[in-house]
């Protein structure tokens, strides 16, 4: 029986660090993992959206997963993204996750071809029943083109015991609210993570478990601080940090996708990593780096221009 209490707090979606030629930079990746552990994060998501899984060949995804899990070495719980438009390929990634002994896997609904609810249900159920690792649904309709409806989530939770939670990346807090209102009566310990950083506090207040915020890769003091203040019932601190996080969250509007923004922010905030990204994305331009610096300044986040 999986201990769901481990899925609480702040789980940064860890960027994958690359050399300029696209190879995994194990030194940089290891340094980032160590930094996050030292920053006090509650867990990590490897190969989420910010981990650039969508632009990696299969062999590289296996390599990144193996390195990260080995380097984390049980210091914090690990979520591993195993998404693909192919049900069979998701299962393949999931069986690999089983071998690595991750704490749970994160699974998007298949993207590109739009699916009716029955096909989407079949995808999630088939994956969950084919692997041992607990499954956390990943709802990101802005990128997949489809929302996982609350009715479908409730049906999956009712009928598939290995589906234990959701990362809800919907730019509308009412969706999180309805997941909690409709799913928790079926499964009281169902895990609910906010995918959007600035909805973390609202998610916690409504009874959710925490967030998977990319800003925690370079400003963990804010997101982890919100969670700690919430647990301590130090609401004045929580509100002040939330206001700071709201100012910081404008980093996501600087570039699409935001992969290079987060890596550049990590470097500016003190960890000297490579800011290279995988094609077709390119490194953050100097002009947008200067805009990022303005956001960090506005949010009160210390940095060093390098």
Image (spheres, grey):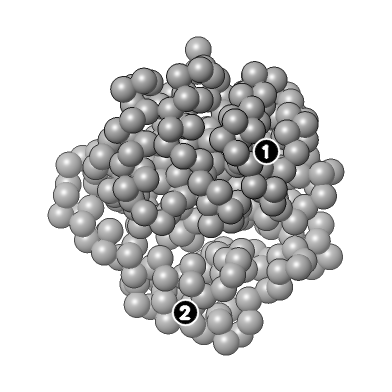
Q: Residue placed farthest to the bottom in the image?
A: 287
Q: Earlier in the sequence, mark 2 or mark 1?
A: 1
* Farthest-out residue, top: 1
Point 55% across, 80% down: residue: 289
Classify residue 49 as left or right of residue 232: right
Q: Residue at x 37, y 36 (%)?
A: 179
Q: Nearer the viewer, residue 185 or 101?
A: 185
What residue is disc 1 on? 82
Mark 2, other Cα within 10 Å: few <14 / some 14–19 / many ≥20: many
The picture places residue 118, in percent across and down from the top left corner, at: 59, 31
Across the whole image, how many numbered discs are drawn on residues? 2
Q: CA distance from mark 2 to mark 1?
A: 33 Å
Q: Nearer the viewer, residue 54 or 267?
A: 54
What residue sits right under mark 2 in the picture?
Answer: 293
Tell me the residue at 75%/38% (across/down). 86
- Residue 143 drawn at (x, y percent): 58, 56
- Estimate the x, y position of residue 129 in percent, counting from the top left: 64, 19
Relative height, residue 155 to residue 285 (above, below): above
How many neighbours does mark 1 have within 10 angstroms: few (below 14), some (14-19), or many (20 or more)? many
Give the image quarter of residue 93.
Answer: top right
């Amino acid at each position: 029986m999986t201990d769901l209490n481990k899925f609480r707090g702040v789980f940064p979606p860890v960027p994958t660090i690359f050399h300029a030629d696209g190879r995994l930079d194990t030194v940089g990746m290891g340094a980032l993992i160590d930094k996050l552990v030292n920053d006090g994060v509650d867990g990590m998501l490897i190969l989420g959206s910010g981990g650039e899984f969508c632009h990696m060949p299969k062999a590289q995804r296996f390599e990144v997963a193996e390195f990260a899990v080995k380097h984390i070495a049980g210091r914090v719980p690990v979520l591993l993204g195993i998404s693909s438009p192919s049900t069979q390929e998701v299962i393949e990634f999931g069986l690999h996750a089983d071998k690595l002994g991750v704490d749970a896997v994160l699974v998007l609904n298949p993207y590109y071809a739009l699916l009716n609810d029955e096909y989407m249900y079949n995808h999630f159920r088939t994956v969950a029943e084919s692997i041992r690792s607990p499954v956390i649904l990943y709802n990101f309709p802005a990128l997949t083109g489809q929302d996982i409806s609350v009715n479908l989530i409730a049906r999956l939770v009712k009928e598939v015991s290995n589906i234990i939670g959701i990362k809800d990346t919907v730019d509308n807090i009412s969706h999180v609210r309805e997941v909690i209102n409709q799913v928790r009566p079926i499964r009281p310990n169902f895990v609910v993570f906010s995918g959007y950083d600035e909805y973390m506090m609202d998610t916690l207040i409504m009874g959710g478990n925490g967030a998977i915020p990319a800003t925690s890769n370079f400003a963990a003091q804010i997101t982890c601080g919100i969670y700690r203040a919430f647990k301590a019932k130090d609401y004045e601190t929580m509100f002040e940090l939330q206001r700071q996080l709201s100012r910081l969250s404008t980093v996501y509007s600087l570039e699409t996708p935001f992969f290079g923004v987060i890596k550049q922010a990590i470097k500016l905030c003190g960890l000297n990593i490579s800011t290279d990204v995988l094609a077709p994305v390119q490194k953050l331009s100097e002009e947008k780096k200067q805009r990022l610096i303005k956001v960090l300044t506005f949010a009160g986040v210390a940095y060093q221009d390098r």
